[in-house]
Amino acid sequence: MILIYYNIDMNNDRIAEILEEIGTLLELKGENPFKTRAYTNAANTVRGTAEPFEKLVAEDRLQGIKGIGESIRSKITELVGTGRLEYYEELKNSIPAGLIALTQLPTLGPKKVKILNEKLGVTNIDQLEDACRQGKIAQIEGFGPKSEAKILEGIRFHRQYATKHLLIDAILISDHVLVQLRNHPDVIRCDVAGSVRRHKEVIGDMDFLVSSKRPSRVIDFFTNDKRVINVIAKGETRASVNYEGGIQADLRVVDDQQFPFALAYFTGSKQHNIIMRRLAIQHGWLLNEYGLFDQDEETRDAGNLIPCKNEEDIFNRLGLSYISPELREDQGEFEAAEKDNIPRLLEWTQLRGSLHNHSNWSDGFESLDTIASGAADLGLDYWAVTDHSRSSRQANGISAETLRKQIIEIKDINAKLAEQGADFSLLSGIEVDVLADGRLDFDDDLLSELDIVIASIHSAFAQPEAETTQRLIKAAQNPFVHMIGHPTGRLLLEREPYRIDIKALIDACAETGTWIELNAHPQRLDLDWRHWRHAKDKGVKCAVNCDAHRLAHAAFLRLGAGIARKGWLTPDDVVNTLKPKDFMNALSSKRRRYKVI
DNA sequence: GCCGTTTTCGGCCCGACTGTTTTCAGTCG
């Protein structure tokens, strides 16, 4: 492990990770909670700083950064300067390895892990599971049968997802790998296939495909990438490696004639491929990863190959129009493609802004000025500031009074932008909490002053399905609520969605003219792509939002658009593709309908 | 460990929820 991470550049994320781990280690030791929080806070500060700390250290500019005092300052300096930190190493050595992993299990925090370790000697998940099964946990003071059951459930969940990864983590690697491959002289064509190309929100491993006349050179190049931490297998035409973060990737090298067939074969979901091959059989052909062959012939060599220069040719040969990778899930794409009814899907470049974002007035990292000028520079037309409302204390939710001040400040900024002739506007809004009883955190008077209102749930996740559903339906019925934010509250690989009747919510949104968010935060991607066709059929509009906490998160739009495509959405289904004037008109349509303006 | 300062140490976000207790501790957001 040590070798692995010391080879990684000390970027801000890595520094933040180490500071955070120090915080957890100190908690496990039972240190003063405020001291441990100081490390967590410092980690957040580092993570939220745009400038690289390597640069700040080099230029001796660490002084005066809020949340980083003398002690942590010297630790960061050591970390950046030497790539290691003595204090951190000693701390890690003083605590059994594996305890930190236990704190990641739901219902287990540092205090409970410390007790389990002291009373039962538990240091890893397997030992913890044994202890649960033997009923030892329930015997300990402060624990009981329910704790035992919850821990076992948590372990089951953890195991289920241990080999799964967020789409964004895979894309960050595949973007890097594809750039490398494209620049390699022996690579003719290359692409990422598999679930990454299909834009599945969670992926197991990655599949890269290359066509080349010199496979071994490409294989060598691939396995020697600096981000590869170990090579699992390496042969003449294929290799498997593990990247940083534990993601496995396979590379296959084929000759260029085979490339489209291999790409289609390794991209399609299992079910999609079965149907593709069935269609080939109906034409009297054979389809596999090497080609489409005329089966009347006995042999399957290149002589019988039905040539296709790209995937589109393959689909056309089978009597289908082109099916985008995102749709290859056997969710009706064949019926549509046979009738040439595949919709023209949303492109991420058609998105003109994000309608759900935070600033440093709540839990975002940047000021309104920075956000406005940055978003304008990105070429966006509009960007909504929707900070958290007062009840979200964990997110530094703002009061009604503060929100009124923010509305004024945003007006000032827009006035300045207009003077400069900028074609951009900052919208004032709120992500208002839907409280446990279904009331909103702010009254209608205040909401009516805002350009945009998002209603989201951040509390009482454990309510029965009917109650949670009613909460959101009630929110949708408010004339001032434009959209329901992250409707299921899931955090991919971390937290299950709360129980909710999505169909009932969609019906309520259709009835009231309320939009539903497709939250493009990598851990959310919520509402799930599987529900969007139903929403679209009901006429519910989608907003693809970054949930940005800093401007760099604008990049999530690409991720969100991929999920929207997976949900068969076209530009017409997505409100933030509208030109500014049309969009402002759309913003007021619900209020006009309810005659509240 | 950080901050602010009535410069030498007290306060640091806070409420809901859960499971365990019977008045509370730990976790979570």
Image (spheres, coloured by chain):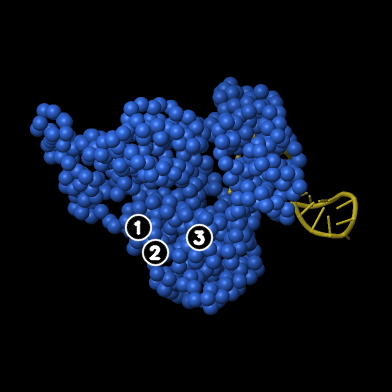
Chain colours: A blue, B yellow
Same chain, marks 1 and 3?
yes
- Residue at (18, 37) in percent of width and height: A292
From this viewpoint, is residue A487 visible?
Answer: no
- Give the Cα distance between marks 2 and 1: 9 Å
Q: Earlier in the sequence, mark 2 or mark 1?
A: 1
| Label 3 environment density (alpha carbons within 10 Å; few <14, some 14–19, many ≥20) | many
- Give the Cα distance between marks 3 and 2: 14 Å
Say the numbered circle drawn on residue A154: none
Say the numbered circle drawn on residue A356: 3
- Quarter of the figure that contains the N terminus of chain A: top right
- Give the Cα distance between marks 1 and 3: 19 Å
Q: Which amino acid does label 2 sit on?
A: Thr
Secondary-structure class at tag 2: helix
- Residue at (68, 32) in percent of width and height: A89
Contact, mark 2 vs mark 1 (Cβ under 8 Å): yes
Of the pair A198 and A336, the residue shown nearer to us: A198
Say the numbered circle drawn on residue A577: 2
Q: What residue type is labelled 1?
A: Leu
**A263 sits left or right of A487 in the view:** left
Q: Is residue A561 above or below residue A127?
A: below
